[in-house]
Amino acid sequence: MNDWQRKSPLDWETYVNKLVKVTAVEKHEYEGWVLTVDPVSATIVLATFPENEKGSISFIMGHAIQEVEILREGDSDMKERLTRISAPEERQAYSPEELEKRRKALKSWLETNHIPVGEQGEQGRTLSVAGVLTIEPPYGPEQCSSANEIILSRVQDLLQGYLGQQR
C-alpha cells in the first residue's frame, strides 16, 4: 500500500476542486482538476479542459499513484464548472398530470409483473416496492432509493427496460 492509499477520505477531500499534478508508476504524469477520490480504491478522478475542446475525465488508479502535488486552488468559476460535470443534466419538467400518468402507468406495469407495489407519502406520490424500495417522481431509475443494493440495482434495471419500451 502506498502513501496515497494510506490517506483518509478527509485528507483526499482537501484535493477536491484543485489543479494537481499526479505522478504515477513508470514516471507517468497527469495534470487536471480533482473531481473526487474514490474512498475504497483511492482512485483519483481528474477533469481537464483543453482549449477549444470539450472537457475530459481521467481516472488514475490509487495503487499506481506515487505523488500528488497541488498546483493551484480552484476559484468559484472552476468549482461551478466542476460541479456541472458531475451534476445530472437539467431534468425535463413534468406537469402534475404527466407525473400522475407516469405514476399510474408504472404502478400498473409493476403489478402486471407481480411486483408488490403500494403508494405512500403525501397524495400517494411515492411508490413503495415490497416495502424496501421507494420511487419518487418522475419515476425513473435515478429516483429509486433503497438500503438494499441488490434490490435497488434490479429494480433500476427493470425500470430502465420499462422506460425503453415506452419510447
Image (spheres, helix red, strand yellow):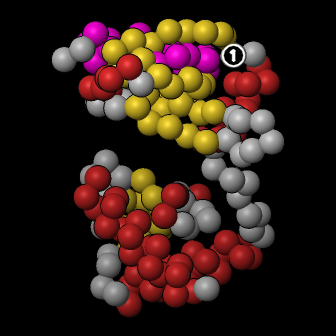
Report helix, strand or loop for mark 1: loop
- Which residue is labeled 1 in the image? 74
For the C terminus, the quadrant is: bottom right
Query: Going by the picture, which residue comes out furthest to the left?
Result: 1
Query: Going by the picture, which residue comes out furthest to the front?
Result: 26
Q: How many marks?
A: 1
Q: Residues within 10 Å of mark 1 (few under 14, many from 20)?
A: some
- Side of 77 where 44 appears, left or right: left
- Side of 81 where 125 appears, left or right: left
Res 114 → quadrant: bottom left
Q: Residue at x 40, y 81 (%)?
A: 110
Q: Residue at x 55, y 16 (%)?
A: 20
The residue range painted magenta reads 3-22
Q: Is residue 126 visible?
A: no
Q: Residue at x 28, y 18 (%)?
A: 5
Q: Residue at x 29, y 30 (%)?
A: 40
